[in-house]
Amino acid sequence: MSEPISVERLRHILTRIGLAVANIRAEKREIVIDLGTPDGSAVEARVFVVPLPSEKRFYYKTKHLGFYYVASTPNDKTLLDKVRLVIQVLSQIEDRFFHEIPLRECEVIARFERLFPFAIVASTVHPDGTLTTYVVVRLTNSCGEGVTLPS
């Protein structure tokens, strides 16, 4: 796999497709990305860290890097549409094969729909029929090191 995406490149990609990134900041164990669009709407994407399960071979090998999930709420269609737009553009930029990888998460099965060097999309169907979509992003700082979040 290629090197993880930098915060600067993530900001650049999101900006190019019309998502204004007002801020990217660390907050406790989360990275918060404030997004805005030309029509004046705004959304806050919360990115939280999940430890790397060592038994999953397809996970990133760098131990200090975690999975960063940009998660929509089950009924937040606006953010979900924006997330899909981001992934659509990323899929055009990254000429890779897409893989479907099953993942057990809590009491539901999340099916990985697309795998990128730095981003994965997973959709989780809850027992009540609602859908939560995650974008898993691997971030680095400008020096190429894994982003370290305060504990």
Image: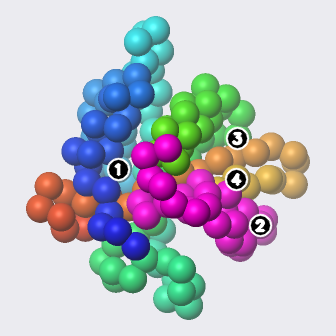
Name the residue tied to disc 3.
74
Which region is colored magenta?
92-121
Is 119 magenta? The answer is: yes
State how far apart marks 1 and 4 are (Cα).
21 Å
Name the residue tied to disc 4.
123
Mark 1 or mark 2: which is in front?
Answer: 2
> Residue 44's quadrant in the figure?
top left
Circle nearer the N terminus (1, 3):
1
Above or below for 7 versus 149: above
State how far apart marks 1 and 2 are (Cα).
25 Å
- Residue type highlighted by circle 2: Ile
Name the residue tied to disc 2.
109
Query: For the point 49% across and 77% down, which residue is it?
Result: 59
- Residue type highlighted by circle 4: Ser
> Residue 2's quadrant in the figure?
bottom left
Name the residue tied to disc 1.
31
Front-most of 127 and 14? 14
| Left or right for 104, reference 13 | right
State how far apart marks 3 and 4 are (Cα).
10 Å
